[in-house]
Amino acid sequence: MTEASRHHVRPATHGQANETAMSEPSATLRNPSETFMSDLNRRRAVVIGSGFGGLAAAARLQAAGLDVTILEKREKIGGRAYQLVDEGYVFDMGPSLITAPHVLDSIFRAGGRRLTDYVDLMPLDPYYRVHFHDGTSIDYVGDPERMKEQMARFDPRDAARYDRFMEKVRPIFDAVVGDRLGSKPFDTVRSMLRFLPRVARMLAWQPVTTFVNRWFRDFRHRFIYSFHPLFVGGNPFTTPSVYLMIPFLEREGGVWFARGGMYSVIEGLGRFFVELGGTIRTGEEVREIVVEDGRTTGVRTDTGFHPADVVVSNADPGHTYGTLVDGAHRRRWTDAKLARTDWSMSCFLLYLGTRRQYPQLAHHTLVLSERYKDLLKDIFDRKILPDDFSMYVHAPTRTDSSMAPPGCESMYVLVPVANQASGLDWAEIGDAFADRIMTFLEAWGLEDLREQTEVRHVFTPADFETELNATLGNAFAIEPKVTQTAWFRPHNRSEDVRGLYLVGAGTHPGAGVPGVIMSAEATYGCIAEDLGLPDQWDWGEKGRVDLEAGATVEKLETAPAAETEPARSTRVPADIAAPQRSGLDPASSERPLPQRRRYASRLTFLRVESEDIERTFP
Ligand SMILES: Cc1cc2nc3c(=O)[nH]c(=O)nc-3n(C[C@H](O)[C@H](O)[C@H](O)COP(=O)(O)OP(=O)(O)OC[C@H]3O[C@@H](n4cnc5c(N)ncnc54)[C@H](O)[C@@H]3O)c2cc1C
């Protein structure tokens, strides 16, 4: 393995690559597990993949005294939280908001540091601005009084029920986050059975929409308190209400953005891990998890065999079991069982750098179709590309001007779409779909969007499959539904191979940044039990961390929603509806483009060598 393949961290501040390379292991770092190090210094762990979950598990193990190496297939760390930089526009390619910062903080605490030593978090207000098909909108905020005030405009009875609704949700939050059920492994039937009476009492087994619809009558309120499972790849009409803890989590802990982009959190984690003494090798794909007599002995990559006492896979379980572990060693996660698994929906992502700003966009804006349940049926069940779409627009420049050149906007548009079981050929339809989204956004109110766009990239379900080894191009691993929750998910401690552990969105508790970080704690708990490592539980004061004091907030202009409402119907005009239900007519998108605009029809890869970025487009 060459020295050049070692990863260097490049925090992106003010749109520029920061030249700081990862430092050598710091002798001054306080390691709370020092006493265990002499016993364990021969124990080696390999972590496959460097998403939030992989990085968190690696840092915990390194902090406990193991010798940990992360092997990452791609050219940079981050996984679904990758970063794209083009012409001074900085794009977070996946997660765009932070909830439950105390969960992130717990990783750093395990190594004697704090999240705020590495990342500057900025609180968001509103959390999201939600635009409905009829031109109305709601600023979704944490302050209960402001929420009730807005809800009263549409239905005063709903507003009157808000407090009681939140009190009904509180026990779910207390169980999953407060009592750490999200960060304990559910790997025995007994652990599941013990939890069931509590689930029944909280009605947490009911679909989210069933729970919410009992409390609210107005369609807007029904939406804003039920849509959160979509953040973790679940259909609110089938996902159990245990996921209602997300709106509660947001209200309690706030919604945050990291200065310089979400990728600065990835870089902070990477730097922290290397300072603890860990090694990251990028551009190194694991081809096989080697198993002898039912126990893993290490992994094989193109450069050779990497022996390990512990292997932690952050790759999707479909890839971990289906590709990396030979079928002869799998009794539970057989090919047949993997084929029966429901993989989450995917996303179509459009990254746009525009020469002008659009203050009518909040930092997070949802633009919704008239259809809710039926649109989700198209995505989750029928697996077709419908005529209409709902979308989520991330405009980080609203909060952090360093994300784009002066006066410009970097934004991404996320449209939930079916996974690759749809059979859609994204190489053929991707560009036309991107054009359709831009035409829609122009009609909706982003004037001259096409004319003003100078950087454009897309990331499609096909890219999820090839870039991230995501089964069927899923965006959120295994779909969270009752039959695929807790014990029913692939366990944090492999059921099939001793010494193999899973971490990340595909294991317990599931997707989302807080979820995968809790999964790292659950996985660490299993390894700690097996190897006799110390407990690392430390979420401060019952899971609270006061970040407000340290946060610095830039005040950039966001136009109030009310001022721009009349132009904002989200109905899809007939001329930009999809020409067919299961695909697009590429010819419909042919139009001349202005000279300065640079297009990449699809993102192929970003290669990072030391501090330089080279982009390659087809
Ligand atoms: C578009 C989008 C927006 C999102 N927005 C939010 C948000 O705002 N807030 C939030 O909390 N969550 C959000 N999520 C969810 C969250 O980002 C993910 O659940 C989480 O980042 C997944 O992390 P992970 O640890 O499971 O690993 P992943 O990020 O999936 O990383 C797995 C890594 O393993 C690597 N790998 C795979 N196979 C191999 C191999 N054979 N050898 C070596 N390496 C391999 C991959 O390259 C990848 O780097 C979003 C997700 C998406 C897709």
Image (cartoon, rainbow, N blue to C red):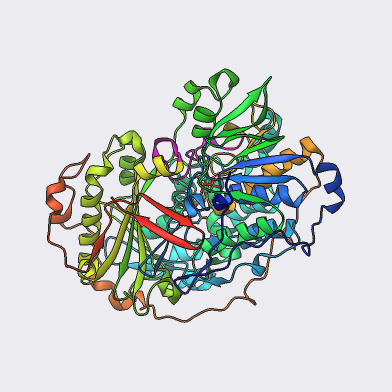
User: Horizontal placement of 54 versus 540: left or right?
Assistant: left
| Residue 234: percent from left, percent from top | 45, 44
**Image quadrant of residue 129?**
bottom left
Front-most of residues 357 and 291: 291
428 left or right of 197 in image: left
Q: Is residue 350 visible?
A: yes
Residue 120 locus on image (x, y percent): 58, 71
Nearer to us in this view, 460 or 222:
460
Quadrant that contains the N terminus: top right
Tag count: 0
Which region is colored magenta? 469-487
**Is residue 184 in sight in this rendering?**
no
Decide whether residue 474 is among the magenta residues. Answer: yes
In x, y percent, where is residue 509?
Answer: 59, 43
Rendering coords of residue 492 (x, y %): 64, 37
Residue 499, quarter of picture: top right
Residue 372 inside the magenta-drawn segment = no
- Compare residues 324 and 522 and report the one nearer the observer: 324
Residue 313 to residue 158: above or below = above
Q: Residue at x 34, y 79 (%)?
A: 407
Residue that appears at 54% across and 20% down: 327
- Say which residue appears at 42% left-offset and 57% top-offset: 93
Q: Nearer the viewer, residue 164 or 503?
A: 503
Can you name the residue that lies furthest to the top here?
328
Q: Judge from the rendering whether residue 370 lies leftward or rightward of residue 299; answer left or right.
A: left
